[in-house]
Each structure stands twice: as structure tokens, then as C-alpha cells.
Image: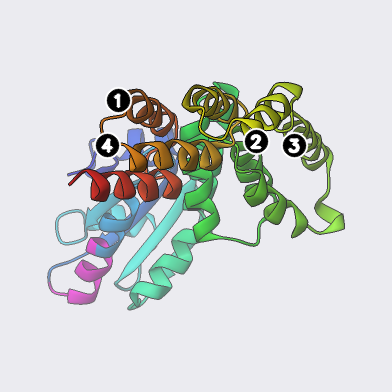
Amino acid sequence: MSSNIVVITLENFQQVVIEESKSKLILVSFWADQVPESVQLRDSLTAKVSAFPEHMILATVDCQTHAQIAQQFGIQGLPTAVLVKDGQPIDGLSGPQTEEQVQTFLDNHLPKMEDGLLNEAKLALVENDINTAYSAASKAYQIDNERADIKIVLADAAIQLGKTAEAEVLLETILMVDQDGAYQAVIAKLELANQAAESPEIKALEAQLESEPDNDDLKHQLAVQYSQVNRNEEALELLFRLVQKDLSNTNSKELMLDVLKVLPEGDSLATKYRRKLYTLMY
């Protein structure tokens, strides 16, 4: 049983329902074996609430054993569940409930999954863990692709991973009313990233490579420069062509693997080039 699922007795009633409700929501589910709908509600709440130990405790009351507790709440019929905060009832469920009704009730009081993912992404950005930030923000975006705050954080992470085209698409969909300070900061990052992607070093190498198209060393240098400014797809394509031309080209292969290592886990670009490399090798 999850740590936030508690069986209520007369002995722990004061501690759980009164004291614990000062810091967390307490959902008291009243049930009895002779009322199958109340058992069903209890079990449904148990499955859903167990995933939110930091926010809610489910306190179950067997009305056959502890009728006195049910009387204190003024329970007149089952199934019933009462939500308690600071020792006072603030909401509840009464009568048979569908899974959708239970979920709607909980959604009104529990943090949404996308909020948790968004907070994870923001914290990861602060800690400069860009891969984690991008992964968490992407999952939040998949749940709700309309929220501007999710788009902004995802665009921020995307820029830092060199996915500037993706960031541009995200930022273009943000309405004027949502273009706040955070949005403006990410726009500035995008402009700087675009400028860095066309550094003098890269332009010089590209020009030199045009005049020496068979110079593998120049291609390695350019791939490294591309990778450093997060132009990873161009770096990977350049290196893949070298490996494709000569399977014994160990330097190109190792450099390609190094570029792949810096991409986030599950990144579509990494998946694409790992598959291409595997097909080529085997």
C-alpha cells in the first residue's frame, strides 16, 4: 500500500484528518462491504491518489467498524468521500461515481501532470541539465500543446540543444498576450544562437572546404565546429558521408559517435543517425 493511503481508526483520526490536513489535502473515503459501490469508489481513489503522495492522503473509513467516525462527518449514505483541508470539509463526492467523474473531481484539487513536468524542466534548465529539461518539456507539450509557458520552456531547451528551427516554430505560435519577459528572453537567445551558428570560424572552414572538397581533416574540423554551435544534424551528415565512403575511417566514426552522445536520450536525430550507422555497419 502506498505511503499516502491510510486506514482511519479512532486512534489515528486526530493525527491524520486534523493535523495532517494542515499541510496536505485529506480525502476521506467512507465504505462498507455491503455497499459494493463504496468499495469501488475507495479502490478507484486508491489507484489515483497513490501517485500524489506530496499533495494528498487518502484516508479510508470502514463504516461497519468505525460507525462513530462516519457519524462525526454526518455521513448519511454510501458511497461518500469528503475532502478535508485545515480540519474542515471543502469538497466531496456522494453516490455512485464513474471513473471519469472521479478523475474530474481529483483534477480540480491535484496538480496536473504537465505542471509537474514543466517544473521539472524549469529546474533542469537552472541546473544546466538541458537534456532533461528538453525531455520533460517535450512530455508536457505532448499533454497540452496550447500552453504558452510550456512552449517557452521547450523552446528555451531546444535552442540550447541547437534545435533552433523547432524553437522558431514554437515561438511563432505564442500569442501577443503571452509574449512576456520569459518569451522575450528566449527570443534573444534564439537570435544569439542564430548568430553563433554562422561564426567566422565556420564560414572560413566552409569556404576552405569548397576549394578542397576531398580534405577529410577539414570536414572533421567543420563537424566539430557545427557540433559546438549545436548544428548537430549538419555535423552528423558530414561525418556519416565519410564513414559511408570508407568503413575503415575510424576517426570519422568515433567523432560521429561523440556527437551522438551529446544528444538527449530518445532524440529523433540521434535515433535516425544511429539507425543509419547500424545499417551501414551490419
Q: Position of residue 176 (x, y in %)?
A: 87, 56
Q: Quadrant of residue 127?
A: top right
**Which quarter of the rendering shows the N terminus?**
top left
Q: Are marks 2 and 4 in contact (CB under 8 Å)?
A: no
Q: Specify which label sits upstream in the sequence, 2 or 1.
A: 2
Name the disc covering residue 250, or none. 1
Q: Specify which label sits upstream in the sequence, 2 or 4.
A: 2
Q: Circle 4: is it few (<14), some (14-19), or many (20+) Cα within 10 Å?
A: few
Q: Amino acid type of disc 1? A: Thr
Q: Circle 2: is it few (<14), some (14-19), or many (20+) Cα within 10 Å?
A: few
Kindly report the distance in space between the C-alpha atoms of the residues bearing marks 4 and 1: 8 Å
Kindly report the distance in space between the C-alpha atoms of the residues bearing marks 3 and 1: 32 Å
Circle 3 is placed at which residue position? 194
Circle 2 is placed at which residue position? 210
Please state if 1 lies on the left or on the right of 56 as rendered. Answer: left
In the image, the segment drawn in magenta is 34-43
Q: Position of residue 203 (x, y in %)?
A: 72, 29
Q: Amino acid type of disc 4? A: Leu
Q: Amino acid type of disc 2? A: Glu
Kindly report the distance in space between the C-alpha atoms of the residues bearing marks 2 and 4: 24 Å
Q: Circle 1: is it few (<14), some (14-19), or many (20+) Cα within 10 Å?
A: few
Residue that extends furthest to the right in the rendered view of this protein: 176
Kindly report the distance in space between the C-alpha atoms of the residues bearing marks 3 and 4: 34 Å
Magenta stretch prevailing secondary structure = helix
Q: Are marks 3 and 4 in contact (CB under 8 Å)?
A: no
Circle 4 is placed at which residue position? 247
Q: Quadrant of residue 228?
A: top right
